[in-house]
């Protein structure tokens, strides 16, 4: 069953890679592959700092635990996908890294929760009276 999924992916990757080589040339394709490998290695080497920063944000309450988990996994898998040569894997990797950026910067901008118990309390110096007729 897994071969049914992997085989079309391999053919699509091969077709797109050959199309890109034909369009931009073999030299630029080799530069692209080497550049994406170096970028993937650099991202993986810096993943420990990124995850530590995410843990610090969780402790400080700036990032939820689920968002931290999703962002960390997306960062690591995105780095691995960029490390693997190919057009489709690079697109998946960039998409996962953009999702990580979304979780770190955009998803954490949420409205603050209002404490309902404070809204029901009145001023301590005021006596609230209800007149029933």
Image (spheres, rainbow, N blue to C red):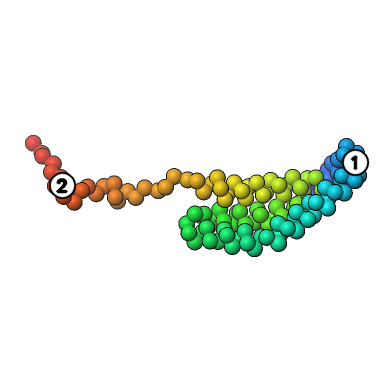
Rendering quarter of residue 69? bottom right
Residue at image position (72%, 49%) is 93
* 7 with respect to 64 (left or right): right
Query: 94 or 67: which is nearer to us?
Result: 94
* Image: 59 above or below 104: below
User: Label 1, label 2: how many angstroms apart (C-alpha)?
Assistant: 80 Å
Residue at image position (83%, 50%) is 33
- Identify the residue position indicated by label 1 in the image: 25
* 45 with respect to 128 (left or right): right
Q: Position of residue 127 (x, y in %)?
A: 14, 47
Q: Secondary structure at mark 1?
A: loop
Query: 90 or 34: which is nearer to us?
Result: 34
- Identify the residue position indicated by label 2 in the image: 126
Residue at image position (62%, 59%) is 50
Q: Position of residue 60 (x, y in %)?
A: 48, 59
Dividing the image into 4 quarters, which one contains the C terminus?
top left
For disc 2, the neighbor class at 10 Å (few under 14, some 14 to 19, many from 20) is few
* 67 with respect to 131 (left or right): right
Q: Position of residue 105 (x, y in %)?
A: 56, 48
């Amino acid at each position: 069953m897994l071969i049914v999924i992997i085989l079309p992916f391999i053919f699509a990757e091969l077709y797109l890679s050959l199309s890109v080589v034909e369009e931009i040339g073999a030299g630029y394709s080799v530069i692209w592959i080497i550049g994406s490998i170096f970028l993937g290695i650099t991202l993986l080497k810096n993943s420990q700092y990124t995850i530590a920063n995410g843990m610090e944000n969780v402790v400080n309450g700036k990032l939820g635990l689920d968002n931290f988990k999703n962002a960390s996994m997306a960062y690591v898998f995105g780095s691995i996908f960029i490390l693997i040569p190919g057009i489709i894997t690079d697109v998946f990797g960039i998409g996962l890294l953009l999702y990580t950026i979304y979780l770190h910067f955009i998803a954490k901008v949420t409205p603050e929760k209002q404490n309902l118990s404070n809204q029901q309390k009145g001023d301590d110096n005021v006596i609230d009276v209800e007149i029933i007729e």
